[in-house]
Image: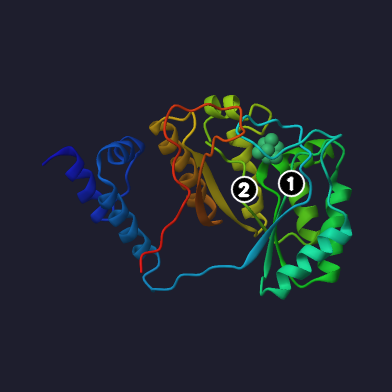
C-alpha cells in the first residue's frame, strides 16, 4: 500500500495521526481527499446535521498598539490612533442588537497606557446597559494587560470574567512556533504564553476559539506543529469551540511574500 493510503486508512479507522503523518497527508493528499477526511472527522464528533452560527459585530475599542506586528495594516501610534468613547461603544452595540446580533467581538491593540481598570470599566459599562455576550480580548491582549497591571494571567482573566467577559477569541495565535512568531510579531507573547492564557481561561470555565494565520513566512511543518499544539491543549481542557484559519493578506504590511496569497473568499454553490 502507498504510504499516503496507509495514512488515509488510519484516519478512516479513527486512529490518531502523529505530526509526521499529518505533514505527509497535508503535502501529498489532494484537496478533495483532505476535505472528505475532515468532513468525516466532523461527523465523528458531531453526528447530527446541525450547523450553528452567531450574529456578532467586531468592535475594535482602540487601534493604538505598541506591538508593531509586521503583518498588521491596522495599528497606529499613540498620537494618531483612537480609543472608542463610551458613546461610540453604546451606539455600535445598540446597532448590533437592532440588527438581531447577540454578541460582540471586542478586541483592540496593545495600548501602552490602558491597565486592568480601563477594561473592567468598559466591560461593566457594557453589561450594565446591554444584554449581550462579550467575546473579547485575544491572548496577546490578556498577556499584555496582565504584564501592564502587575497581575498574573489567571488573576487578569478572573477579574475580566467578573466584570462581564464571557469567552475569548483565539486571535494573535498567528503560527504557534516561536521562530516564525518572532519574525512576524516580535513583540507579542510567545507560543507557550498564548497557550497558557487559553489554558487558564478554560480552567476558569470560559470557552474560546483558536485561530491560525497562514500564507506568510511559515512552512508546512509549522502549520502541522501549530495544529498539534492546539490539539494537545484541547485534549487537556476541551475548551476550544471553534478553529478559524485566517489567510494572510499582504497589502500595506511589512511582509513581502513570493507565494500567491491564499484566498479569503468563500463560495456558496447554488
Ligand atoms: S497586536 Fe499586532 S496585529 Fe494586533 S493591532 Fe497590534 S500590531 Fe496589529
The residue nearer to you, when weighing 86 against 1, is: 86
Q: Circle 1 sits in a helix, a strand or a loop, which is it?
A: loop
The residue where tag 2 is placed is 198
Question: In the rendered structure, which disc, 2 or 1, sits on the residue that comes first in sequence?
Answer: 1
- Which image quarter: residue 79? top right
Point out the frontmost of discs 2 and 1: 1
Quarter-of-image position of residue 136: bottom right
Quadrant location of the C terminus?
bottom left
Q: From the Cβ of disc 1, is ligand 1 less than 8 Å away?
A: yes
Residue 108's disc is: 1
Q: Label 2: few (<14), some or many (≥20) within 10 Å?
A: many
Instruction: Give the percent coordinates (x, y) of residue 137.
Output: 71, 50
Q: Quadrant of the N terminus?
A: top left
Q: Where does the image place residue 173, in percent across and percent down from the top left? A: 58, 41
Measuring from the top left, give residue 32's x and y in whole percent: 27, 52
The answer to whether 249 appears left or right of 67 in the picture is left
Residue 56: x and y, percent? 65, 64
Tell me which image quadrant ligand 1 sits in. Answer: top right
**67 and 269: which one is in front?**
269
| Image position of 79 with respect to 58: above or below | above
Amino acid at each position: 500500500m502507498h504510504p499516503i493510503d496507509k495514512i488515509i486508512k488510519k484516519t478512516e479507522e479513527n486512529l490518531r495521526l502523529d505530526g509526521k503523518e499529518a505533514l505527509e497527508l497535508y503535502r501529498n493528499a489532494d484537496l478533495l481527499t483532505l476535505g472528505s477526511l475532515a468532513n468525516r472527522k466532523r461527523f465523528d464528533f458531531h453526528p447530527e446535521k446541525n450547523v450553528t452560527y452567531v450574529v456578532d459585530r467586531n468592535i475594535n475599542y482602540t487601534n493604538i498598539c505598541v506591538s508593531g506586528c509586521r503583518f498588521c495594516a491596522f495599528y497606529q501610534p499613540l498620537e494618531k490612533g483612537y480609543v472608542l468613547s463610551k458613546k461610540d461603544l453604546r451606539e455600535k452595540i445598540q446597532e448590533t442588537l437592532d440588527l438581531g446580533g447577540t454578541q460582540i467581538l471586542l478586541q483592540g491593540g496593545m495600548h501602552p497606557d490602558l491597565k486592568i481598570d480601563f477594561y473592567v470599566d468598559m466591560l461593566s459599562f457594557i453589561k450594565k446597559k446591554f444584554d449581550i455576550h462579550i467575546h473579547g480580548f485575544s491572548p496577546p491582549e490578556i498577556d499584555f494587560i496582565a504584564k501592564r497591571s502587575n497581575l498574573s494571567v489567571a488573576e487578569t482573566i478572573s477579574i475580566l470574567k467578573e466584570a462581564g467577559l464571557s469567552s475569548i477569541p483565539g486571535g494573535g495565535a498567528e503560527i504557534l512556533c516561536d521562530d516564525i512568531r518572532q519574525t512576524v510579531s516580535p513583540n507579542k507573547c510567545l507560543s507557550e504564553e498564548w497557550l497558557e492564557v487559553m489554558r487558564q481561561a478554560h480552567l476558569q470555565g470560559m470557552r474560546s476559539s483558536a485561530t491560525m494565520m497562514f500564507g506568510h513566512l511559515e512552512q508546512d511543518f509549522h502549520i502541522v506543529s501549530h495544529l498539534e499544539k492546539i490539539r494537545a491543549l484541547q485534549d487537556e481542557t476541551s475548551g476550544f469551540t471553534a478553529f478559524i484559519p485566517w489567510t494572510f493578506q499582504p497589502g500595506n504590511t511589512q511582509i513581502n511574500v513570493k507565494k500567491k496569497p491564499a484566498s479569503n473568499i468563500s463560495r456558496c454553490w447554488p
